[in-house]
């Protein structure tokens, strides 16, 4: 099965007085795709500022899956999410926040159209999952006809006590197949 993958760059800034921030940008990347099914995500998100040893929570913006395969029956799909480590500078000891420190929950659909049964991977923060492995973000389990769904996922990053201050960058990838 071919997959459309969109990469979301996220920026995490750890605040410590007297440490300058570095500026940068992230970009969207599109890989192979399942014909008729598209996924879109914001190109880059700044999650804000957190403190060493603390927790930073932020929304990634609207993720959208559009299935235009028409009468294919059933035209089900599964959207997945994964993450890289967040690093500052060249990374390494004390400059890396592991992907397992990033939790994700999809939340409910904020907009949907067309037929089928659409199910969030994690409806609430109580169901948040670690992005130390690829996880299900959303799915269409039944139905035919064109459909779209949008959700606004949230991530929570546990910032280890031993990391240095700096601007941390990582990638959160949503795919659909």
Image (cartoon, rainbow, N blue to C red):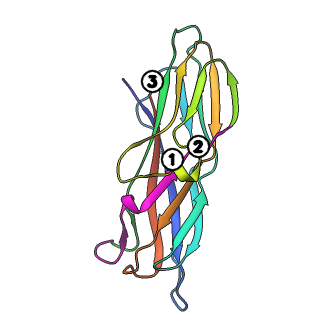
Determine which quarter of the picture holds residue 107: top right
> Is 107 included in the stretch rendered in magenta?
yes
Residue identified by numbered label 1: 28
Residue identified by numbered label 3: 34
Magenta span: 91-109
Q: Say few, some or many: other residues with alpha carbon within 10 Å of mark 1 (under 14 / 14 to 19 / 20 or more).
A: some
Q: Secondary structure at mark 3?
A: loop
Residue 88 is left or right of residue 59, and the answer is: left
Q: Secondary structure at mark 2?
A: loop
| 2 over 107 or under it: above or below | above
What is the C-alpha distance between the residues marked 3 and 1? 18 Å
Q: Say few, some or many: other residues with alpha carbon within 10 Å of mark 2 (under 14 / 14 to 19 / 20 or more).
A: some
| 34 over 161 or under it: above or below | above
Could you tell me residue 46's position as x and y percent?
A: 59, 63
Looking at the image, is mark 3 or mark 1 nearer the viewer?
A: 3
> Is 94 included in the stretch rendered in magenta?
yes
Could you tell me residue 63's position as x and y percent?
A: 60, 41
Q: Say few, some or many: other residues with alpha carbon within 10 Å of mark 3 (under 14 / 14 to 19 / 20 or more).
A: some
Q: Nearer the viewer, residue 23 or 57?
A: 57
The earlier-in-sequence mark between 3 and 1 is 1
Q: Residue at (36%, 23%) from the top-left corner?
A: 1
Q: Secondary structure at mark 1?
A: loop
Q: Are marks 2 and 3 in contact (CB under 8 Å)?
A: no
Q: Residue at (48%, 64%) from the top-left corner?
A: 157
What is the C-alpha distance between the residues marked 2 and 1? 26 Å
Q: Nearer the viewer, residue 24 or 16?
A: 16
Could you tell me residue 6's position as x and y percent?
A: 49, 42
Looking at the image, is mark 2 or mark 1 nearer the viewer?
A: 2
Q: Is residue 142 visible?
A: yes
Q: Residue at (56%, 55%) from the top-left corner?
A: 44
Residue identified by numbered label 2: 123
Q: Residue at (33%, 71%) from the top-left corner?
A: 91
């Amino acid at each position: 099965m071919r997959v459309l993958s969109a990469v979301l760059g996220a920026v995490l800034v750890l605040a410590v007085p007297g440490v300058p921030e570095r500026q940068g940008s992230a970009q969207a990347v599109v890989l192979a795709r399942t014909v008729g099914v598209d996924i879109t995500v914001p190109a880059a998100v700044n999650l804000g500022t957190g403190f060493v040893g603390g927790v930073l929570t932020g929304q990634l913006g609207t993720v959208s899956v559009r299935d235009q395969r028409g009468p294919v029956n059933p035209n089900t799909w599964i959207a997945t999410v994964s993450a890289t480590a967040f690093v500052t500078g060249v990374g390494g000891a004390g400059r890396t926040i592991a992907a397992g420190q990033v939790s994700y929950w999809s939340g409910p659909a904020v907009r949907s159209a067309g037929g089928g049964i659409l199910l969030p991977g994690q409806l609430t923060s109580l169901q948040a999952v670690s992005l130390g492995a690829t996880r299900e973000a959303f799915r269409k389990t039944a139905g035919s006809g064109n459909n779209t769904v949008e959700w606004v996922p949230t991530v929570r990053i546990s910032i280890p006590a031993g990391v240095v201050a700096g601007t941390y960058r990582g990638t959160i990838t949503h795919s659909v197949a």
